[in-house]
């Protein structure tokens, strides 16, 4: 009798566990697809190798995006999965093939789009015309004048830093978009910028474009031991060398 009673208890407990497990809420991996929606679209022309950059409201629209689509195909079509929500999107295609950096003359860029993503598939059609004219220039696009700034980008140990650019501003606040941007530094950390005219300039070096520096970015300003950035005053035709900038990770 005792053995049968324990057997009935065991079977009852087993059935109870089975029922509970069958009615448990699905795991995160099972529900992940339920809150993802899809944005599909086409860049008219059509335009291949363009990207849809999606930002959440309040984000810097010229900084790193919340999400980026794969490159559009030969028909200009793209697709991107997103959590439901309200977003701002923009399509960009850079002539140099890079996925980040400023949009300059010769690149394609759409107007900013308001995206309301609410389950299922959201369809968009967008134009991304060729950009003509830009106040900001990369070093490779500047006329080779004889007004030149050059130097190195170094880390806190004095070692050259590869893959950074020098941003040139004409205001000490350096809050507006830079007027000129150097090409990326090589293994020796050296940069060189031909400027169209003499003037008073302020320099920063960083490895990212757009918006204020974020955690993990490399960033540094040219200064001579002062709190504020140091001005670099150039005369027309002057060639200033050894203007070195030290960068550190932003934490």
Image (spheres, grey):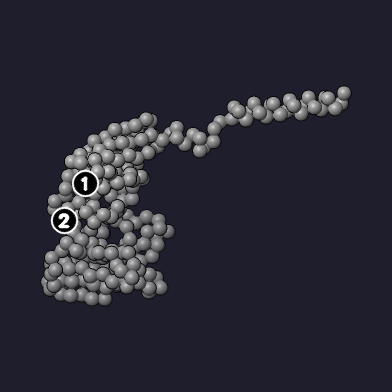
Split into 4 quadrants, where in the image is the N terminus?
Answer: top right
Mark 2 against mark 1, which lies toward the viewer? 1
Q: Nearer the viewer, residue 56 or 11?
A: 11
> What residue is disc 1 on?
109
Question: Can you give x and y, in whole percent of width and height, for residue 165 in the image?
Answer: 28, 63
Return the residue nearer the eye: 64 or 105.
Answer: 105
Choose top left, top right, bottom left or bottom right for residue 23. top right
Give me the C-alpha separation between circle 2 and circle 1. Answer: 16 Å
- Residue at (21% x, 46% y) in the render: 109
Asked if residue 211 is positioned above or below residue 202 in the image, the reply reads above
**Where is residue 149 shown, x and y percent of the image?**
21, 71
Please tell me whether residue 116 is drawn above or below residue 101 in the rendered image: above
The residue where tag 2 is placed is 135
Asked if the residue under mark 1 is in contact with the one under mark 2, i.e. CB atoms within 8 Å, the reply is no
**Residue 114 is at least partly visible in this image:** no
Horizontal relation, residue 141 to residue 72: left or right: left
Return the x and y of residue 41 as percentages of the image width and height: 27, 37
Q: Is residue 72 visible?
A: yes
Query: Residue at point 24% right, 49% down?
Result: 93
Which numbered disc, 2 or 1, marks the residue that appears first in the sequence?
A: 1
Name the secondary structure under disc 2: loop
Q: On the image, which quarter does residue 205 sit in?
A: bottom left
**How busy is the neighbourhood of tag 1: few (under 14 within 10 Å), some, or many (20 plus)?**
many
């Amino acid at each position: 009798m005792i053995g049968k009673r324990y057997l009935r208890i065991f079977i009852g407990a087993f059935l109870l566990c089975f029922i509970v497990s069958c009615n448990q809420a699905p795991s995160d991996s099972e529900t992940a697809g339920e809150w993802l929606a899809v944005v599909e679209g086409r860049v008219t022309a059509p335009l291949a190798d363009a990207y849809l950059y999606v930002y959440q409201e309040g984000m810097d629209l010229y900084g790193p995006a919340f999400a980026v689509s794969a490159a559009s195909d030969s028909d200009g079509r793209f697709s991107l999965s997103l959590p439901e929500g309200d977003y701002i999107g923009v399509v960009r295609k850079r002539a140099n093939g890079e996925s980040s950096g400023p949009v300059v003359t010769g690149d394609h860029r759409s107007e900013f789009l308001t995206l309301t993503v609410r389950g299922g598939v959201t369809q968009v059609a967008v134009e991304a015309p060729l950009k003509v004219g830009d106040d900001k220039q990369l070093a490779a696009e500047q006329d080779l004048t004889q007004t030149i700034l050059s130097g190195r980008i170094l880390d806190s140990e004095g070692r050259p830093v590869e893959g950074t650019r020098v941003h040139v501003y004409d205001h000490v606040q350096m809050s507006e978009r830079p007027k000129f941007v150097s090409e990326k530094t090589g293994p020796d950390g050296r940069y060189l910028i031909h400027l169209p005219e003499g003037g008073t300039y302020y320099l920063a070096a960083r490895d990212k474009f757009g918006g204020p520096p974020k955690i993990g970015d490399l960033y540094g300003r040219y200064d001579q031991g002062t709190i504020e950035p140091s001005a670099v005053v150039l005369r027309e035709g002057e060639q200033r060398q050894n203007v070195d900038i030290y960068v550190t990770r932003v934490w």
